[in-house]
Image (cartoon, rainbow, N blue to C red):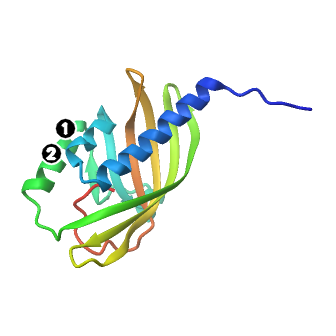
Amino acid sequence: MNQQKVNAPALEIKAAIEELVHAYVECIDNDKLEQWPDFFTEECLYKVISRENYARNLLTCVIYCDSKGMLKDRITAHRHANIYEAHTYKHLVSGIRMAGQEGDTYLVRANYAVFQTRQDGITEVYNVGQYMDKVTFVNGEAKFKEKLAVYDTALIPMLLVTPI
């Protein structure tokens, strides 16, 4: 009988990264957006970009933040400056995969679907795509160094104010 040896540290890393992904979407879904930047390293990149622009290596994206400070500013604007219809999100995340490693950074892919419920009670599929993440560990804790939400949705039906 051929038995494979289980690599315990690799399983612990994968579990920590999966927990990061699930805690991230739970934070957004529960409207705890002031905690959202804490999922990232100080120097980070967060983009929401169409699959077409990503595939063509075009720079245009819906959201672009290149530091934790910009993430915090985005939430401040979200809470105090943006005018938008009140809504809630529910994320479904599947297929979390370790896609590779670059030094101490792990390349992670996951599919996502975001459902949005408006004040009138109507729920619609809002955004669907793939997370393309770079995750590193800071003081033993998994953090996003880079998070790209590469969306398949052809049209975003209203202003995108809440992170994906």
- Front residue of 72 and 15: 15
Residue at (32, 46) in percent of width and height? 46
What's under tag 1, amino acid-wise? Gly
State whether residue 66 appears in this view.
no
The tag on residue 108 is: none
Q: How many marks?
A: 2
Q: Which residue is mark 1?
A: 69
- Front residue of 18 and 107: 18
Helix, strand, or loop for circle 2?
A: helix
Helix, strand, or loop for circle 1?
A: helix
Where residue 61 appears, as percent x and y from the top left, is: 32, 58
- Front residue of 54 and 164: 164
Q: Residues within 10 Å of mark 1 (few under 14, many from 20)?
A: few
Where residue 2 appears, as percent x and y from the top left, is: 88, 32
As drawn, is 103 to the left or to the right of 114?
Answer: right
State whether residue 63 appears in this view.
yes
Quadrant (top left, top right, bottom left, bottom right) of the C terminus = bottom left
Q: Determine the image quadrant of residue 8.
A: top right
Residue closest to the far right: 1
As drawn, is 120 to the left or to the right of 12?
Answer: left
What's under tag 2, amino acid-wise? Asp
As drawn, is 27 to the left or to the right of 79?
Answer: right
Label 2 with label 1: CB-CB less than 8 Å: yes
Quadrant (top left, top right, bottom left, bottom right) of the N terminus = top right
Q: Determine the image quadrant of residue 100.
A: top right
How far apart are the alpha carbons under marks 2 and 1?
Answer: 6 Å
Where residue 21 appears, as percent x and y from the top left, is: 43, 45
Q: Which residue is mark 2?
A: 73
Q: Residues within 10 Å of mark 2 (few under 14, many from 20)?
A: some
Where residue 101 appears, as percent x and y from the top left, is: 55, 33
